[in-house]
Image (tube, grey):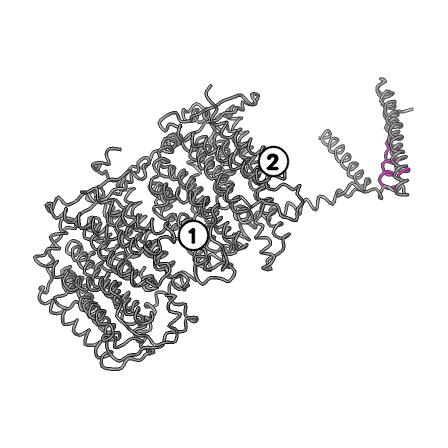
């Protein structure tokens, strides 16, 4: 029995969450440092996984398997393929930045009594989410996955509903936008909406999970996938389709795919910037990840059957999300709609069922996480300075805080997939991968890149350029803590944009396996080209 | 030697990184550092050029492969460079003119507190532009292609406290993105068809490919070229781009970046040659733009916008030539190089005039400046003679060849294209003479500088000059020196290239070349070029040289009014795209809120309503519970009895 | 005598009791009606016991009586305490079970 690396990676933040919650009220500063240390330790473990993962080795590595509920064949089975490794690395990577960016977000208001302990709760909840997300990426038992897929809603609910932009509420009151109670009501509306949407999705998935057990007799992803691929496990076509839809619905809510997206702008708008990053960059990735792993692996035929509809929905997401982003007045909601557009790209890449599309989609998940984190966290710094989320309240920030404006621009350029930055690689792979099989879909999706430029540049122009507004005249530039958050993210964006090879090497074998699961091969080029010298090598 | 190619790109890239990340510490030395990096790149370029000349004509292409960029199953994208005669020409033009403009900017931007950043952006531009021309595959070219777009965005919007500059920058980027979309679709088609997008394999496989596919690729490349090179219908951004500092207009929006479209078409010559329909489209775009730009150039009173119209028109010539196939590629590039010299010179001259005139750009408020700015006058004058194609100067050699090639296209088409090209030459002579006369001749029409508060001026120094009459003076040496060098190029480059057809022989191995056979004979065409030139100059002299010029522009004919507004294209864009887009997004926001979200909220509300009704049954009265209990029992018993009865 | 007549009587008594429960407000009267219903059931049980010739019905009748007695004790206690606090024996006043 080898060292249970995967369990430990998930257990460290889980234990950290409990410890953080137990820190006495008077020492809330210690809670922050504890949370940061735990997230860094988890990052170290994730790096260890990534380094020791052998791209050429078995499909699932570091596997662990223990009986759990033997009456129903539920096992505690963990294992990661390249896609899982990439996403665990992303999750572990973003956490320290999220914690650092939210350093003061949960400091108690002076008016509250000293026994109130929001700080400990905030960081404990973040760590709890991290633990659950990581175990979702690791689980190869469908039931185990389901449990954590649902359980992470609970800490997320409290993070969204319990910790809003404090400055926003007071500012909107001053600006005549409403009162503190109004802001609190909107926040709880957003939290409940988030919970109900995802619970509804989860409920339908639960039915499908039970159905799968009835059909297959166990919950093991590896066994079922292997049996499906070998043809030893027959499913009636209609059964397979129903089960597929049950799974897909839950993931499409989480991802989110149009028209199940409306919870995201509310949730991201009302939550603090770090929590918004947690939602879109980390938690939502579980949805797209699960589509790739569970929908395609368990139900290959049904996936192919549903592809046309899903591609159309993804296209609608891309264009619709981008157009709505253009029309937003609120910075955070704008980023949320941009994310919806990007999730459309990811889902399109997954269901195009080509190597380029799926590698691109996996890279897209990672790159979108980093780029959205960069943009959203800088936006959060901006919002905390002026105390307003409205784009119209800003103007000329560039003159006052050039570093803030510069980092904001880079985050924006990453969002519009500028070549040289990481998201370009993934977006282009997705487009190319889709185009080779579905040219029309690929061409329409390309309009997304024009719209992305539109919403990003409009946002930048309205907030950062032009004459300096009176209210932003005294705005300080980025502080050291904020620079510590932004600089590594930007460095990663540039690094992965110029040299994505380490990532693609990990992801490629997993994509190959998925392609063989669905029994699809890439379309062959129409015209044979003699290999050029040098290119023939690889 | 070929290992130096990467350094060409790396030097200015390093410069940009150092200048942009260096912070305020570098404020004092930043401009020299930036110039140094540009000059270093030029030095490497010259060394590589010497090396290339040392080898035989067929042995001049060198490759450098750095690393595999995106290795994915079935997908191979490398960071690899290809240096051949075509890229070499561009490298020398970009780094040479680029270095000169760096030097010029030292003087021009002297009073700007953000000068270091300006040089950082300029270096970034050089790196991206070099990447564009050195890439050996379309995807890497695309990186450079968008990179120059980014640099152009940053530099047009450099004075971003001016809302007009910020808007112009955004517009330039957006219109370019539409073109970029074309390039990315072209790459996607290439990948689907050939499984690769490296130059060599793609061009090698053209023979076995259906014409429809090639036409699609070529048309998408043309769309990309239209965006970057400001060709109709994507030309609207170039005029607004003049909001940027003048050195930027000279380097990016005259000499180098806007000619990237010509490079793209010439580079993809193999594809275009096999797709005649697409070539026709290229020719039409070029011909339409060359007239469009010329007409716009006639009506503008803003000296930079007049020159921008001229740039559009001259690039129209190049695109036209590139669309003619092997008879035109070489001349397109030749005109591109000579244009790089004289148009950069003209813009620098315009910048020098503005520098002496309180940043006034309206030519109607100039006049009689030749006495006050002798060097600017002479260098600008030489550039002027070159652009109108005065016999013997650079522009003459290259433009004459293009007109010849247009006639040589043959048939009615040839006559139409040749006629358009000649007409364009006449209009060019007209509007450039107009610029010359309004600026340097006639009486002084200077106006006091506008109130600084009323118009947010480009330079902070402008605040001190409010209300004073300008004191025109010659610009400092850092500014006049590049102008003199470029003037030399404007005068001699074309002639040098034409000695013994040196330029043709230089490029022929890359672009292929055929001698065209114009139906008129070269002599007749040259003669008619000179005639239309004289007509154009004469008309301009009659209108602007002999009569006093009003300071406030007269209303003008309908054509003048339309041309002042860029032939109404902006109005069209505004009404259709901007307004339409606003309505679309606004209504979608409404739909999202009320329809998509409404369905969900409606479901929630109806569940809530239903439970509200049901709640009323639980009224707390024990007797009403008892009634329901009795009622229920009665119904159950009745049902049981009925069942038994049945 | 035909035992069916006892059943008619039991049904009649039960109906009277049920109607009383539904109509009257006074807790004591309500209580008496409940007792009436219980005893109607007892009557029916005993009648059935006689008709079928076994003792099960009579045993259940005894059970019912015991339970009814216990119920009277608890119920009267509730009514008394309600009356003490509210000064009313009307059941409609004690409608606290709704939201």
On screen, residue B539 versus residue A57, left or right, reads: left
Residue A506 position within the rendered picture, expressed as x and y whole percent measured from the top left:
37, 32
Is residue B119 or residue B22 the one in the foreground? B22
Residue at 41% x, 73% y is B451
Q: Is residue B387 visible?
A: yes
Chain letter for the residue marked with disc 1 in the picture: A
Rendered view: A333 above or below C79: below
In the drawing, what numbered circle is on residue B85? none
Q: Quadrant of residue A312?
A: top left
- Numbered range of the magenta stretch: C10-28
Q: Sort mark 2 into few (<14), some (14-19) or many (20+) by Cα contacts within 10 Å.
A: many
Which residue is identified by label 2? A23
Magenta stretch: helix, strand or loop mostly: helix
Left or right? Give the position of B640 relative to A248.
right
Residue B45: x %, y % from top left: 20, 50
Q: Nearer the viewer, residue C68 or B425?
A: B425
- Chain under disc 2: A
Residue A380: in magenta span: no
Q: What's the mark number on residue A403?
A: 1
In which quadrant is the C terminus of chain A drawn? top left
Q: Residues within 10 Å of mark 1 (few under 14, many from 20)?
A: some
């Amino acid at each position: 029995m080898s060292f249970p690396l995967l369990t430990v990676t998930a257990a460290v933040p889980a234990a950290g969450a409990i410890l953080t919650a137990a820190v006495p009220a008077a020492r809330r500063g210690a809670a922050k440092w504890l949370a940061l240390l735990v997230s860094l330790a988890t990052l170290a473990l994730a790096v260890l996984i990534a380094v020791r993962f052998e791209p050429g080795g078995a499909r699932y590595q570091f596997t662990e398997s223990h009986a759990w509920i033997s009456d129903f064949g539920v096992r505690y089975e963990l294992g990661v393929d390249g896609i899982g490794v990439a996403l665990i690395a992303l999750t572990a990577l973003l956490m320290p930045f999220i914690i650092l960016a939210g350093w003061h977000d949960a400091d108690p208001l002076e008016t509250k009594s000293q026994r109130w302990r929001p700080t400990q709760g905030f960081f404990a909840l973040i760590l709890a989410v991290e633990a659950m997300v990581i175990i979702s990426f690791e689980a190869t038992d469908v039931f185990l996955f389901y449990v954590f897929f649902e359980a992470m809603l609970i800490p997320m609910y409290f993070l969204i509903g319990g910790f809003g932009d404090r400055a926003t509420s007071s500012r909107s009151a001053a600006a005549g936008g409403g009162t503190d109670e109004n802001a609190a009501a909107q926040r709880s509306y957003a939290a409940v909406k988030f919970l109900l949407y995802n619970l509804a999705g989860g409920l339908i998935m639960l039915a499908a999970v039970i159905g799968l057990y009835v059909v297959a007799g166990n919950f093991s992803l590896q066994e079922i996938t292997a049996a499906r691929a070998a043809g030893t496990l027959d499913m009636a076509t209609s059964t397979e389709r129903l089960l597929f839809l049950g799974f897909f619905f839950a993931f499409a809510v989480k991802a989110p795919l149009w028209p199940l997206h409306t919870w995201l702008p509310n949730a991201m708008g009302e939550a603090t910037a770090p929590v918004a990053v947690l939602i879109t960059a980390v938690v939502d990735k579980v949805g797209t990840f699960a589509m790739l792993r569970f929908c395609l692996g368990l139900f290959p035929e049904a996936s192919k059957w549903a592809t046309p509809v899903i591609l159309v929905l993804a296209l609608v997401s891309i264009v619709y999300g981008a157009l709505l982003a253009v029309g937003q007045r609120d910075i955070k909601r704008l980023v949320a709609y941009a994310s919806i557009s990007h999730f459309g790209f990811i889902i399109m890449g997954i269901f195009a069922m080509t190597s380029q599309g799926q590698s691109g989609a996996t890279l897209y998940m990672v790159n979108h996480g980093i780029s959205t984190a960069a943009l959203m966290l800088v936006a959060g710094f901006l919002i905390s300075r002026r105390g307003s989320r409205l784009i119209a309240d800003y103007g000329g920030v560039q003159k006052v805080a050039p570093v803030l404006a510069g980092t904001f621009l880079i985050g924006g350029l990453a969002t519009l997939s500028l070549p040289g930055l990481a998201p370009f690689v993934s977006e282009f792979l997705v487009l190319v991968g889709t185009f080779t099989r579905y040219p029309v879909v690929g061409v329409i999706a390309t309009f997304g890149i024009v719209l992305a430029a539109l919403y990003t540049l409009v946002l930048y122009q309205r907030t950062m350029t032009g004459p300096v507004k009176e209210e932003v005249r005294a705005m300080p530039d980025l502080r050291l803590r904020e620079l510590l958050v932004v600089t590594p993210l930007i460095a990663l964006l540039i690094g992965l944009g110029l040299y994505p090879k380490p990532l693609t090497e990990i992801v490629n074998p997993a994509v190959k396996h998925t392609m063989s699961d669905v029994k699809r091969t890439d379309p062959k080029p129409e015209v044979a080209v003699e290999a050029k010298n040098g290119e023939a090598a690889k | 030697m070929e290992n130096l190619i990467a350094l060409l790109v790396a030097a200015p890239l390093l410069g940009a990184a150092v200048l942009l990340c260096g912070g305020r510490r570098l404020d004092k030395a930043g401009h020299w550092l930036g110039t140094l990096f540009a000059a270093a790149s030029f030095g490497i370029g010259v060394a590589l050029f010497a090396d290339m000349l040392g080898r035989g004509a067929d042995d001049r292409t060198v490759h450098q492969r750095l690393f595999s960029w995106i290795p994915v199953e079935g997908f191979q994208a490398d960071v690899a460079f290809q240096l051949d005669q075509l890229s070499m020409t561009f490298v020398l033009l970009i780094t040479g003119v680029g270095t000169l403009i760096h030097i010029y900017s030292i003087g021009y931007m002297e009073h700007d507190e953000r000068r270091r950043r300006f040089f950082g952006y300029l270096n970034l531009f050089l790196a991206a532009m070099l990447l564009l021309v050195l890439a050996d595959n379309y995807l890497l070219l695309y990186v450079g292609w968008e990179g120059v777009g980014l640099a152009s965005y940053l530099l047009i919007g450099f004075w971003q406290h001016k809302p007009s500059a910020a808007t112009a920058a955004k517009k330039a980027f957006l219109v370019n993105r539409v073109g970029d979309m074309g390039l990315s679709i072209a790459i996607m088609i290439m990948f689907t068809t050939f499984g690769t997008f490296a130059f060599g394999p793609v061009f090698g496989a053209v023979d076995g490919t259906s014409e429809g596919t090639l036409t699609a690729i070529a048309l998408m490349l043309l769309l990309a070229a239209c965006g970057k090179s400001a060709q109709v219908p994507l030309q609207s951004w170039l005029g607004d781009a003049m909001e940027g500092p003048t050195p930027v207009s000279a380097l990016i929006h005259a000499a180098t970046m806007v000619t990237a479209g010509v490079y793209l078409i010439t580079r993809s010559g193999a594809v275009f040659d096999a797709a005649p329909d697409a070539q026709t489209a290229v020719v039409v775009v070029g011909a339409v733009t060359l007239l469009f730009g010329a007409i716009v150039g006639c009506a503008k009173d803003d000296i930079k916008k007049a020159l921008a119209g001229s740039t559009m028109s001259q690039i129209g010539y190049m695109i036209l030539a590139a669309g003619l196939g092997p008879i035109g590629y070489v001349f397109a590039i030749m005109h591109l190089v000579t244009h790089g010299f004289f148009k950069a010179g003209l813009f620098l001259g315009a910048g020098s005039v503005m520098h002496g005139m309180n940043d006034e750009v309206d030519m109607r408020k100039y006049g009689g400046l030749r006495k006050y700015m002798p060097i600017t006058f002479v260098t600008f004058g030489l550039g002027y003679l070159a652009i109108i194609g005065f016999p013997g100067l650079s522009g003459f050699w290259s433009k004459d060849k293009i007109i010849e090639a247009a006639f040589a296209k043959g048939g009615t088409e040839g006559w139409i294209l040749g006629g358009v090209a000649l007409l364009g030459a006449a209009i060019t002579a007209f509007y450039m003479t107009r610029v010359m006369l309004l600026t340097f001749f006639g009486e002084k029409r200077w106006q006091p500088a506008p109130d600084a508060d009323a118009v947010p001026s480009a330079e902070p120094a402008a605040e001190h000059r409010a209300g004073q009459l300008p004191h025109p003076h010659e610009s400092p040496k850092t500014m006049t020196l590049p102008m003199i060098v470029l003037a030399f190029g404007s005068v001699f480059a074309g002639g040098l290239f034409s000695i013994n057809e040196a330029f043709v022989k230089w490029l022929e191995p890359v672009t292929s070349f055929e001698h065209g056979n114009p139906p008129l004979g070269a002599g007749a065409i040259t003669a008619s070029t000179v005639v239309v030139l004289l007509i154009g100059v004469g008309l301009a002299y009659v209108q602007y040289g002999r009569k006093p010029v009003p300071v406030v522009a007269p209303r003008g004919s309908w054509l003048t009014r339309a041309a002042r507004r860029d032939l109404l294209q902006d109005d069209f864009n505004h009404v259709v795209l901007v307004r339409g887009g606003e309505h679309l997004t606004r209504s979608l926001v409404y739909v999202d809120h009320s329809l998509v979200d409404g369905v969900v909220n409606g479901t929630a509300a109806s569940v809530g309503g239903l439970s509200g009704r049901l709640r009323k049954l639980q009224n707390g009265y024990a007797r009403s519970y008892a009634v329901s209990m009795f009622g229920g029992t009665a119904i159950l018993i009745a049902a049981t009895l009925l069942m038994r009865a049945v | 005598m035909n035992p069916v007549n006892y059943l008619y009587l039991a049904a009649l008594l039960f109906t009277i009791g049920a109607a009383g429960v539904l109509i009257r407000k006074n807790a004591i009267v309500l209580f008496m009606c409940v007792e009436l219903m219980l005893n109607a059931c007892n009557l029916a049980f005993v009648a059935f016991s006689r008709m079928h010739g076994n003792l099960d019905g009579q045993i259940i009748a005894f059970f019912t009586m015991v339970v009814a007695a216990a119920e009277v004790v608890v119920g009267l206690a509730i009514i008394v305490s309600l009356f003490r606090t509210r000064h009313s024996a009307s059941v409609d006043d004690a409608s606290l079970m709704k939201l």
